[in-house]
Structure formats: C-alpha cells, structure tokens
Amino acid sequence: MTKSELKKFLQIKIDQKANIILNERVRYDDAAFGELKIYACLRRILNKTATLEDLGVLHAVNNLLHATGVLAPNETLGSKVTK
C-alpha cells in the first residue's frame, strides 16, 4: 500500500467511525471511538503532526505485531508503507 492509498483508507475509516459516533441510535459507539483514535493517530503520524502519545501508540502496535509474528523482527508498520 502506498502512503497516498493509506491516507485515503484512513480518511474513509475516520469518516465512517465519526458517523457512527454521531448517530444517536447506535448503542456501541465506544468501539467506533476506539478505532477512531487509532486511525487519527496514524493520520497525524503520516501528516507529520504527531504527538508523543501518537508515537507511543504506534510503537505499541509495532510491538504487538512483532510479538504475534505478523511483522518480522526487522520490519515495522511504517516500513510497509511506500512513497
């Protein structure tokens, strides 16, 4: 996935989750809020406006992906994104 494709994917997901939260009839908007936080974090990292918390979240996700074998020890989530 390219950086541009990832940015588009993130925007779609952020819009979807925000709409769920805005819908007053939805009972489980906390799940959407949790996803929204991760997507917004990654978007800020890609846009170079990340906070230290954003970097910590990405580091934790990388650690989990390494621990579960999804990523090889020499890979990172960032290395999976090109241009």
Image: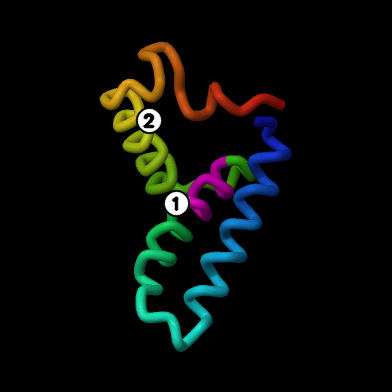
Secondary structure beneath dot 1 equals helix
Q: Amino acid at mark 1?
A: Ile
Given residues 51 and 35, the one toward you in this image is 35
Given residues 26 and 74, the one toward you in this image is 26
Image quadrant occupied by the N terminus:
top right
Q: How many marks?
A: 2
Q: Residue furthest top?
A: 74
Residue 12 position in % (x across, y down): 64, 57
Q: Quadrant of residue 27?
A: bottom left
Residue 14 position in % (x across, y down): 57, 60
Mark 2 or 1 closer to N-term? 1
Q: Is residue 62 above or below residue 52?
A: above
Taking the image as shown, residue 9 lies to the left or right of residue 74, namely right
| Residue at the image position 48 percent from the left and 50 percent from the top | 41
Secondary structure beneath dot 2 equals helix
Taking the image as shown, residue 61 lies to the left or right of residue 81, namely left
Tell me the magenta residue range.
Answer: 39-45
Q: Amino acid at mark 2?
A: Asn
Q: Residues within 10 Å of mark 1 (few under 14, many from 20)?
A: some
Question: Which residue is tagged 2?
Answer: 62
**Which disc is residue 38 wearing?**
1
Taking the image as shown, residue 15 lies to the left or right of residue 5, namely left
Q: Is residue 49 magenta?
A: no
Q: Main secondary structure of the magenta part?
A: helix
Q: Quadrant of residue 18?
A: bottom right
